[in-house]
C-alpha cells in the first residue's frame, strides 16, 4: 500500500516454467466513475468484488495536497454510485483509501494521509454504516503508527474476518478483525519475527480455506539477496513459518491468492517475476514471467492479484511500465492485453468476480477503469 514510515533447497523443485511470450486478447470496456467536484480529481487505488457489487476505492485530490476519501460501487460495472463519508476523525476526513477487501457483502478499506510533526502516514480503517455510507474507525495513534511503525500494507478477507499485513520495527505484523469495528495488532509474535537475524518483511496475505497465509521475504546469505518466506496461522495470532524454495536469484513474495485449494504466491524473481504454489505437498517453485528494465527509475513490484474460475491475474511493474499477467494454474503465465497502463509509479490493480474482471489505473494525472469477461487463459500459449 506504500504507507511506509527461511528458505528451502530448490533442487527438488523441478525445472521452472518457460516464461510465456503470448498475449491474451481482452475486450475491455471503459467504465465511467462519477466526476469529481470542481477543483478536485478522482484518484483510484484498488478494487474488489463485494458479493453483489463492485467497489472501487481511492480519493479525491485537490490543490495544495488536499485530499479526502472516496469510493464508488456498481452492481454491473456500468452505473456507479458514490459512497458518502461522514468522517469523525481529523485524518479520516483526509485519507486516501489504498486497499479494500470484502467479506461477503461487507467491505473494509484502509487509507492514510501523511501529516503530523514528522509527516508520517496516519492510517485509518473504514467500515460501512448502512448502504452507501462508510465511516472511519477511531483508533489510538500507536495502533498503526508510533515509534514502532514501519508500514501498513494490503487488507484481505476470509471466513474469520479481515487481516491487514504490515511490519513494525520488531518485524512482520498483522492486524486482525472479526468485526470491521476494531482491528487488533499482532506484533512480536514469535512465529512471525523469528530471531530477527534475517530481517523478514511481510507484504501480502490470503485466506487459505482454513486459516491465514502471509507471504514476504527475508535477507539471504548475501545481504543484498532476498529469499521467499511464508507464515501460516489458524487464528491470526499464533504463527508458524513455512519453508519456501529459494532460487539462486533475488526472490521476494508480494501477493497471494487461493486457486482451487492451493495458494499461489506471486513476487519478484531475479530480473523479472515468478510464482510459487503451496499444495498438499507444501511449497514449490512454479513459473517465471516478465522482465524488469535495469534502467527503470523505480523498483519492480507486484501490485495486485486476484483469482477466480478463470485462473489467476496479477498486475506488476518493472519500475517504468505496468503489465497484467495471467495463469490458469499458477505456473504457466501469459501477458494479458491492457487497454492502457500508467507509468511505473502509477497505480494499477485488478479485481474479479466469478464472471468478470475489473481493472483500475491511475497515472498521476487521471484515473480510468475498465471491465471485461474473464480472459481465456486456458487457451493461451
Image (cartoon, grey):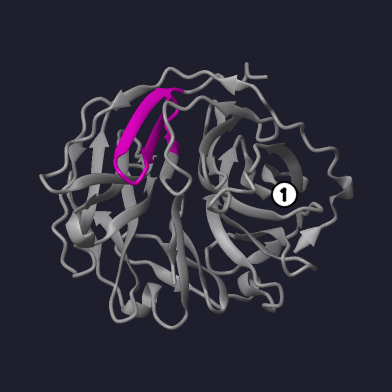
Q: Position of residue 212 (x, y in %)?
A: 56, 56
- Residue reaching furthest to the right: 11
From the image, which quarter does the C terminus lie in?
top right
Of residues 82 and 381, the one nearer the viewer is: 381
Relative to 159, residue 352 above or below: above
Q: Which residues are magenta?
A: 350-373
Location of residue 369 (image quadrant): top left
Rate crowding at label 1 as few (under 14), some (14 to 19) or many (20 or more) other CA atoms within 10 Å: some
Q: Position of residue 185 (x, y in %)?
A: 44, 72
Residue drawn at the location 31% of the way across and 33% of the way down = 52
Q: Main secondary structure of the magenta part?
A: strand
Residue drawn at the location 70% of the way across and 46% of the way down = 271
Q: Position of residue 182 (x, y in %)?
A: 33, 66
- Kindly tell me whether residue 307 is visible in this rendering: yes
From the image, which quarter does the N terminus lie in?
bottom left
Residue at numbered disc 1 = 270
Amino acid at each position: 500500500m506504500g504507507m511506509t514510515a527461511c528458505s528451502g533447497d530448490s533442487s527438488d523443485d523441478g525445472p521452472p516454467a518457460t516464461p510465456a511470450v503470448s498475449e491474451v486478447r481482452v475486450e475491455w470496456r471503459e467504465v465511467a466513475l462519477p466526476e469529481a467536484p470542481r477543483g478536485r480529481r478522482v484518484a483510484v487505488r484498488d478494487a474488489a468484488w463485494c458479493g453483489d457489487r463492485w467497489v472501487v476505492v481511492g480519493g479525491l485530490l485537490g490543490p495544495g495536497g488536499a485530499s479526502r476519501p472516496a469510493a464508488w460501487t456498481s452492481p454491473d460495472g456500468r452505473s456507479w454510485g458514490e459512497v458518502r463519508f461522514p468522517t469523525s476523525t481529523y485524518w479520516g476526513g483526509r485519507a486516501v483509501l489504498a486497499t479494500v477487501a470484502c467479506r461477503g457483502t461487507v467491505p473494509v478499506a484502509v487509507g492514510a494521509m501523511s501529516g503530523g510533526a514528522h509527516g508520517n502516514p496516519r492510517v485509518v480503517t473504514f467500515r460501512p454504516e448502512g448502504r452507501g455510507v462508510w465511516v472511519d474507525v477511531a483508533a489510538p495513534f500507536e495502533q498503526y503508527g508510533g515509534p514502532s511503525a514501519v508500514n501498513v500494507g494490503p487488507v484481505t478477507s476470509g471466513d474469520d474476518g479481515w487481516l491487514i499485513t504490515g511490519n513494525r520495527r520488531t518485524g512482520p505484523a498483522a492486524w486482525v478483525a472479526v468485526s470491521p469495528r476494531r482491528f487488533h495488532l499482532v506484533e512480536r509474535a514469535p512465529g512471525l519475527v523469528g530471531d530477527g537475524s534475517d530481517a523478514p518483511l511481510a507484504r501480502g496475505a490470503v485466506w487459505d480455506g482454513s486459516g491465514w497465509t502471509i507471504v514476504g521475504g527475508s535477507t539471504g546469505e548475501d545481504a543484498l539477496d532476498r529469499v521467499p518466506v511464508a507464515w501460516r496461522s489458524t487464528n491470526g495470532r499464533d504463527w508458524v513459518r513455512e519453508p519456501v524454495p529459494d532460487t539462486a536469484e533475488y526472490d521476494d513474495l508480494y501477493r497471494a491468492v487461493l486457486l482451487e485449494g492451493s495458494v499461489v504466491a506471486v513476487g519478484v524473481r531475479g530480473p523479472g517475476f515468478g510464482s510459487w504454489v503451496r499444495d498438499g505437498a507444501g511449497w514449490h517453485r512454479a513459473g517465471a514471467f516478465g522482465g524488469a528494465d535495469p534502467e527503470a527509475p523505480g523498483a519492480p513490484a507486484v501490485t495486485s492479484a486476484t483469482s477466480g474460475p478463470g485462473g489467476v491475474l496479477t498486475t506488476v511493474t518493472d519500475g517504468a511500465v505496468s503489465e497484467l499477467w495471467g495463469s490458469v494454474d499458477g505456473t504457466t503465465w501469459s501477458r494479458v492485453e491492457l487497454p492502457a497502463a500508467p507509468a511505473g509509479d502509477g497505480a494499477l490493480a485488478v479485481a474479479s468476480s466469478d464472471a468478470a474482471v475489473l481493472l483500475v489505473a491511475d497515472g498521476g494525472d487521471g484515473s480510468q477503469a475498465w471491465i471485461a469477461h474473464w480472459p481465456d487463459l486456458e487457451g493461451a500459449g
